[in-house]
Amino acid sequence: MNCISGIATACTSAAAVLLPTARRAQTGCSGAVRPFQRVSPFDRALLRNHCVPRPGRVERPSVQKLSRFFQFLFGTVLGALPRDLLRELILPSGHPKLLRRRRADMIISRVRMVAALFAVLTPLWIVIDIAVFAWPVTVLLVVGRIATTIAFAMLALSYRKSVRINDAYRALAVMFGIPTVFFIYSHPMLSHFDMTGPAAAISAGYAFLPFVMVAGLAVFPLTAVESVLFALPVLGAEGLVALMRLDILSWSSHLGAFWLLFLIATVAALAGMSQLSFMMSLVRQATHDGLTGCFSRNSGEEMLDIQFHIAARSGAPLSVVFLDLDNFKQVNDRFGHDAGDRVLQGAAESLRANLRSGDMLLRWGGEEFVIVLPDANGATAATAVARLQSVGLGLRPDGGRVTASIGVAERIADGAGDWQQLVEIADERMYRAKMAGKDRCVGCAGDGGAAQ
């Protein structure tokens, strides 16, 4: 796993250098939820040590050939993909929480649908087994099919309400494991019986079960690494059966089957990556505000619900900052709505640039923003607000500073029972800051009260 991850990371880093025209994704939220917003120090080190030639160093011909290969592969085959987007298609570790939930829901629903379908089709094939095979073979196959049907039925009834990606992985592993075990059980057994006519034809069809399984990877939105990991057991089963049948077929026959299996797995992995890319685009469009790039209110409410439940279960603090731009209506009235849009964009950009990597920025409506600060008590939230105030939120069209009235609430200090109550407390304190003269912050008891 570590080896595959290292290769994938090195490849994506190489792609960033070899694609100077690649467009970096225009992001609009904090680094925790949009991991392709910033380049981590580890990635910079990869770029510096593996991709960018050091001054005075002559590249070896083999390195130059490898660079040209990556340039062709990523430039011609994949096009000008942003480097971080390409990395998310290869590795699942940096996916945002909302994408993980959507992906887990889709994978589990499709696993349950496929399992239910095979729970119906598998026992129906018993009729054909009884019709074409001799009695000893029929009994063994019927036993295997009944066990397989029970396993598929149990899987179809499992994970009904889960949206956790780990549950999706387990469901997918079980779905591929069931036919893999049946293949290892049935195919070598059939090969040791002399069969003719229809029995020989049906028996030969059992050899194609691994090809059907790896082709099924195309149904799921998986990264390249995930596709490899789920295809490996099927390839291993094919290899095990090959070792058990060396006395019947030659190595050339098995190598041909392996090569075809590998090609099908590669095509299925690319199809899964294509599905994932499309899902990432849909999630991005559905969850982010088109003007500022922040989370929209609907997706922000979902993120607040997730973060509040996580904090409540672990007993961790959770702070919310409610921010309203001062005198924004005057900007629209005096300079027009286009100027107002630029002010909103500048304020959002300034907020994003000065938040922690795990913080989330939401556009709540109009000129209102909500900042979610996980694992931040009142004092930490006050420090974050002071930093935002010192940096500023940009300039108005007339050259004046953009200011904001701010309210802060914290889950533990304010005794909030749910995220709605937490936001209401922060909103009420923002209103108090507005009434007190604007351009100030009213905090919770945990940060010492109000501050300007």
Image (cartoon, rainbow, N blue to C red):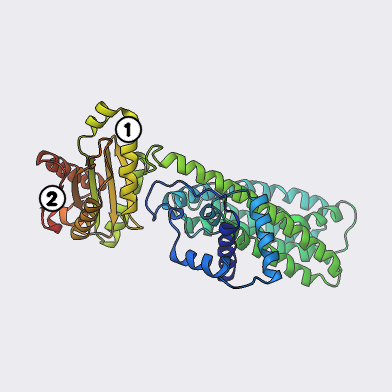
Which quadrant of the view contains residue 150? bottom right
Question: How many residues crowd mark 1 within 10 Å: few (<14), some (14–19), many (20+)?
Answer: some
Task: Tell me how far mark 1 sits from mark 2, CA to CA.
Answer: 27 Å
Which one is in front, 89 or 104?
Answer: 89
Q: Which residue has dot 2 on it?
A: 452
The location of residue 254, given as percent across then percent down, is 81, 65
Residue 21 shown left or right of residue 185 in the figure: left
* Badge 2 element: loop
- Of 261 and 45, the residue lying toward us: 45
Label drawn at residue 339: 1
Please provide percent x and percent y for residue 201.
85, 53
Q: Nearer the viewer, residue 211 or 389?
A: 389
Is 56 positioned to the left or the right of 326 in the image? right
Q: Is residue 339 above or below residue 109?
A: above
Count of marks, rendered view: 2
- Let me know if residue 147 appears in the view: no
Q: Measuring 34% from the left and 52% from the top, which residue is drawn there? A: 353
> In the image, is residue 287 above or below residue 384?
above
Q: Residue at x 41, y 42 (%)?
A: 287
| Mark 2 residue type | Gln
In the depicted view, which residue is nearer to us: 32 or 272? Answer: 32
Task: Locate residue 71 relative to residue 308 in the image: left or right.
Answer: right
- Residue lying farthest front? 56
- The kind of residue tagged 1 is Ala
Sort mark 2 into few (<14), some (14-19) or many (20+) by Cα contacts within 10 Å. some
